[in-house]
Amino acid sequence: MNMVIYAIAAGFAGMGFYALLWPARIGRFFDVRIESVDGRNETRAVYGGFGIAVAAALLLATRNAQLHDGIVLCVAFTLAGMAGGRVISAVVERPGRWPWFFGGIEALAAVLLFYSVPA
């Protein structure tokens, strides 16, 4: 199951580095203009720093048996919360294609991580 964790870690790392390098481009996926210094700072923090930190935590989980289940469950619940928030938002108003796409990835990754932890 480490391959699943590595793949999800790579996704978070990719998102993180992309956001650190090109924060304004992140907004284009969601029709949000990120033009101010504070907006780019927020994007680098939430998408960039957070993404890299989650990737690092998942990699740590593959190397530390004592921390594995806690880290994996925490990230699984985080992803499930993100996907759930998208579903609630879709009930209120219909989003475009990118929120659906990323919501699907978040839901799938959450399920895969939940199954990566022994019962």
Image: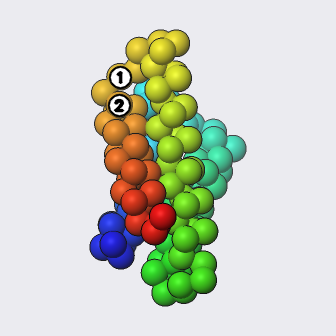
The kind of residue on which mark 1 rests is Gly
**Badge 2: few (under 14), some or many (20 or more) residues near its Cα, within 10 Å?**
some
Look at the numbered disc 2 and give the secondary structure of its residue.
helix
Image side of residue 30 versus residue 34, left or right: left
The quadrant of the picture occupied by the N terminus is bottom left
**Image x and y of residue 6, in percent:** 36, 72
Question: On the image, which quarter does residue 98 sit in?
Answer: top left
- The structure residue drawn at horizontal position 63% and vertical position 55%, both measured from the top left corner, is 45
User: Which is nearer the eye, 35 or 18?
Assistant: 18
The residue where tag 2 is placed is: 100
Look at the numbered disc 1 and give the secondary structure of its residue.
loop
The kind of residue on which mark 2 rests is Trp
Above or below for 116 versus 25:
below
The residue where tag 1 is placed is: 96
- What's the distance in space between the residues labelled 2 and 1, CA to CA? 7 Å
Q: Nearer the viewer, mark 2 or mark 1?
A: 2
**Image x and y of residue 59, in percent:** 47, 77
Above or below for 68 versus 4:
below
- The structure residue drawn at horizontal position 69% and vertical position 44%, both measured from the top left corner, is 38
